[in-house]
Amino acid sequence: MKGAFKKDPQRAAARVDEPDPEGDIGDPPAHLTEIERGCWVELVGLCHEGVLCAADRPFMEYGARVWAQLRSDLFIDPKLGIRFETVCARLGMTPADRSKVQARKKDAEKDPYSEFGAAG
C-alpha cells in the first residue's frame, strides 16, 4: 500500500471496482485529415507507454484536431490554447500532471507475489 492509500485505506477500497483499460489506442481514424492523423500519431508517441487504451480514442481524436488547428492557425486563439493544455494535462503530458497518470502494466511486469500482500 502506498501514500494516500496508507493514510486512508478506504480510498483503495472505493477504487476496487474501477474498470481495467482494455485494447490498444490503435491507428488514427480514417476520417481525420492528413494533418490531424499526423498529430494523432505524434500525440500517441508522446504519451507514456501503458496510459492509452481503446476507450481513449474519442479524446485522442479531439486532441489531434485541436493540435492540428493550433499548428495551422497564424493567430492562436487563447481558448484553443487552453483546450490543448487541458488535453496535455489529461494525458499526463505536463510536469504537474505526470504524477497523476497511471500506466497499465503488462502481464509480464506484474509482481508475481502481489496476491500475497506487502511484506512487513
Image (tube, grey):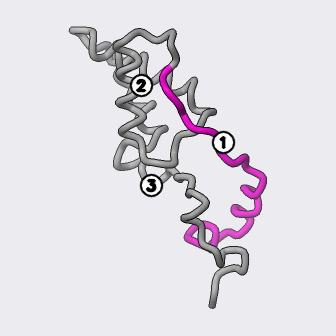
Magenta stretch bounds: 1-28
Magenta span includes 13: yes
Residue appearing at x 49%, y 51% in the figure: 100
Q: Which mark is residue 40?
A: 2
Q: Is residue 73 above or below residue 12?
A: above
Q: Give the mark nearest the N terminus, 3 or 2.
A: 2
Q: Quadrant of the N terminus?
A: bottom right
In the displayed structure, does residue 78 sit left or right of residue 86?
Answer: left
Q: Does the residue at mark 3 contact the one at mark 1 (Cβ under 8 Å)?
A: no
Circle 1 residues within 10 Å: few <14, some 14–19, many ≥20: few
The percent position of residue 48, horizontal first and vertical second, equals 42, 47
What separation in Å lies between label 3 and label 1 (alpha carbons)? Answer: 21 Å
Residue assigned mark 3 = 99
Magenta span includes 76: no
Q: Give the mark nearest the N terminus, 3 or 1.
A: 1
Tell us which disc is closer to us: 3 or 1: 1
The type of residue carrying mark 3 is Ser
Residue assigned mark 1 = 22
The type of residue carrying mark 1 is Glu
